[in-house]
Image (cartoon, rainbow, N blue to C red):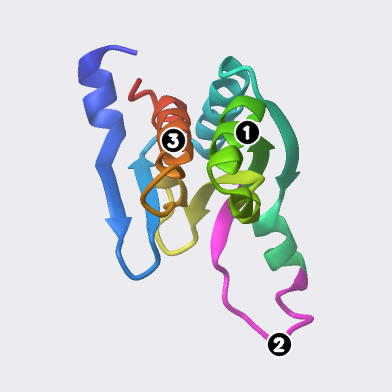
């Protein structure tokens, strides 16, 4: 992707929502392109996608069942995976880091902001878990063509 195209595609660089500790990147690329970019970025790291949770479909399907008429997403998926190398390193430092595994990155197009797709993940605590955050950040950035 050319730099000018990349600059036009990226609406917003990274930001961390302090109240929620979520890191996101937003783009005007299609949901399908970002999802494909995310899958490719995960696989390029030599990782295996354990599960894709179709959160948007589930919420749309069950919206009326739970008494809601609010449409949250045009589309939204969460990808779960793990890294044997990084996970071993952070769990050898503290076995309780198992609580953070598997790792998840989501792709979502909000119903109230169609045409803007975000990719993101939960931020991790300081210390050894920053290695995981760096891995997820590189994958998320690659998904939208920033790396």
In the image, residue 140 sits, relative to residue 59, either above or below, namely above
| Mark in front: 1 vs 2 | 1
Residue 18 picture location, percent across and down: 30, 65
Q: Name the residue that disc number 1 marks.
A: 88
Cα distance between the residues tagged 3 and 2: 41 Å
Q: Name the residue that disc number 2 marks.
A: 67
Cα distance between the residues tagged 1 and 2: 44 Å
Q: Mark 3 packing: few (<14 Cα in 10 Å), some, or many (20+)?
A: some
Q: Are marks 1 and 3 in contact (CB under 8 Å)?
A: no
In the rendered image, the quadrant that contains the C terminus is top left
Asked which secondary structure carries label 1, the reply is helix
Asked which secondary structure carries label 2, the reply is loop
Residue 125 picture location, percent across and down: 41, 54
Identify which residue, 83 or 111, lies in the foreground.
83
Residue at far bottom of view: 67
Task: Say whether residue 98 is left or right of residue 115.
Answer: right
Q: Mark 2 packing: few (<14 Cα in 10 Å), some, or many (20+)?
A: few
Cα distance between the residues tagged 1 and 3: 11 Å
């Amino acid at each position: 992707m050319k730099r000018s195209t990349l600059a036009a595609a990226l609406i917003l660089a990274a930001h961390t929502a302090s109240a929620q500790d979520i890191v996101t990147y937003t783009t005007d690329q299609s949901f399908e392109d970002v999802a494909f970019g995310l899958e490719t970025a995960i696989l390029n790291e030599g990782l295996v996608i354990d599960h894709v949770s179709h959160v948007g479909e589930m919420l749309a399907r069950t919206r009326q069942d739970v008494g809601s008429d609010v449409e949250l997403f045009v589309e939204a998926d969460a990808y779960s995976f793990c890294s044997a190398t990084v996970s071993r390193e952070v769990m050898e430092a503290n076995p309780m880091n198992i609580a953070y595994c598997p790792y998840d990155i989501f792709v979502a197009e909000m119903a109230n902001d169609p045409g803007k797709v975000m990719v993101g993940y939960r931020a991790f605590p300081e210390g050894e878990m920053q290695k995981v955050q760096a891995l997820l950040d590189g994958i998320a950035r690659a998904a939208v063509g920033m790396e």
